[in-house]
Amino acid sequence: MQTFTTIADLRAALAPHRRAGRSIGLVPTMGYLHVGHMALARRARAENDVVVATIFVNPLQFGANEDLARYPRDLARDQAMLEAEGVDFLFAPTVADMYPRPMETVVDVPKLGSELEGAVRPGHFAGVATVVTKLFNIAQPDRAYFGEKDFQQLAIIRRMAGDLAQPVAVIGVPTVREADGLACSSRNVYLSAEERAAAVVVPRALEAAEALVAAGETDPKRLEAEVRAFIAREPLAAAEVVAVRDPETLAEVGQIGERPVLLLLFVRFGGTKLLDNRVIDPKILETAKGVQR
Ligand SMILES: Nc1ncnc2c1ncn2[C@@H]1O[C@H](COP(=O)(O)OP(=O)(O)OP(=O)(O)O)[C@@H](O)[C@H]1O
Ligand SMILES: CC(C)(CO)[C@@H](O)C(=O)[O-]
Ligand code: BAL
């Protein structure tokens, strides 16, 4: 695997492959990689001739009081992990390589980007959309891979790529979890031992919600309240976002019944944010009940 830090060097490495008609898969990350990132890399490896991973802790998507300076980093370990997955090129620019002058241009998906996590982190999703557009322009991939754990981010990137006719297929990859169900996340390293043990309440809350829907809950507001109460039983957890939404549009839903719904969680443990979500399909739950009977 070759590592590049400048836009020009990555483009020069990709040019002969593009001329030869080879497909390019892109895996954008902020580094400090874990098995969730590896699932993205593996999928990209399986579906493309050339795989490019990127590691860039993007200042545009961090708020003034967020963890930009202390975001975990370990380039040597990340390189070894990507190499083991058969990634061809790593693009790991510095902030000066990526943004040689202050960015004047912003890509924003303002409606989707200002609610849920976006309401708690103003400007965050515009920073994401802007850097992802720039990464698309730099690598010009045929396919780009993003985790479903960051469900709202994936929805925003899909919408952006569609609205702007960006010539890339945006592919979502299912969430990879630790043994106890907690979604793998780079920021999990911030958790103290007590917080890590308590964090299992997040996947458990998703399971509890599914059980409530299976038992007949149809009111999204009541389900949200029940999930909030479930999380509140864990004293170290502070639920910022508990939302039942349409999985396609992220719009609010009137009733849980015919169509699948998304339950989206953003829960803080101390200063650490954890995201998780689950698509709950009442029809499948109904069928499963029938099979058990
Ligand atoms: N557990 C996971 N399973 C699948 N994909 C994941 C998982 N965690 C992260 N990803 C995806 O990897 C890509 C890069 O994410 P990022 O580098 O921010 O990692 P992260 O673990 O989500 O970090 P953070 O803890 O900062 O949110 C994103 O598309 C993200 O959705
Ligand atoms: C997509 C991304 C790499 C853009 O900086 C980041 O938001 C992430 O790691 O999810
Ligand atoms: N994984 C999403 C990137 C962020 O929280 O900044």
Image: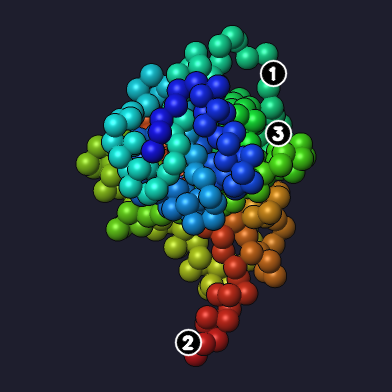
Q: CA distance from mark 1 to mark 2?
A: 56 Å
At x 49% / y 44%, what residue is drawn?
A: 51
Q: Quadrant of the N terminus?
A: top left
Front-most of residues 175 and 237? 175
Instruction: State the image quarter where residue 8 is shown.
Output: top right
- Is residue 234 at least partly visible in the picture? no
Q: Mark 2 = which residue?
A: 292
Instruction: State the image quarter where residue 37 is shown.
Output: top left
Q: Amino acid at mark 2?
A: Gln
Please state which of the two labelled residues, at mark 1 or mark 2, is closer to the viewer: 1
Percent position of residue 116, x then y: 60, 39
Instruction: State the image quarter where residue 83 is shown.
Output: top left
Q: Is residue 103 above or below residue 201?
A: above
Q: Is residue 108 above or below residue 87?
A: above
Q: Residue furthest top?
A: 101
Please state which of the two labelled residues, at mark 2 or mark 3, is closer to the viewer: 3
Disc 3 element: loop
Q: Mark 3 = which residue?
A: 109
Percent position of residue 234, x then y: 34, 48
At x 39% / y 48%, what residue is drawn?
A: 86
Disc 1 element: loop
Mark found first going from the N terminus, 2 or 3: 3
Percent position of residue 104, x then y: 67, 13
Percent position of residue 29, x then y: 46, 36
Q: Amino acid at mark 3?
A: Val
Q: Mark 1 = which residue?
A: 105
Q: Amino acid at mark 1?
A: Thr
**Quadrant in which ligand 1 is drawn:** top left
Q: CA distance from mark 2 to mark 3?
A: 44 Å
Q: CA distance from mark 3 to mark 1?
A: 13 Å
At x 49% / y 57%, what residue is drawn?
A: 46
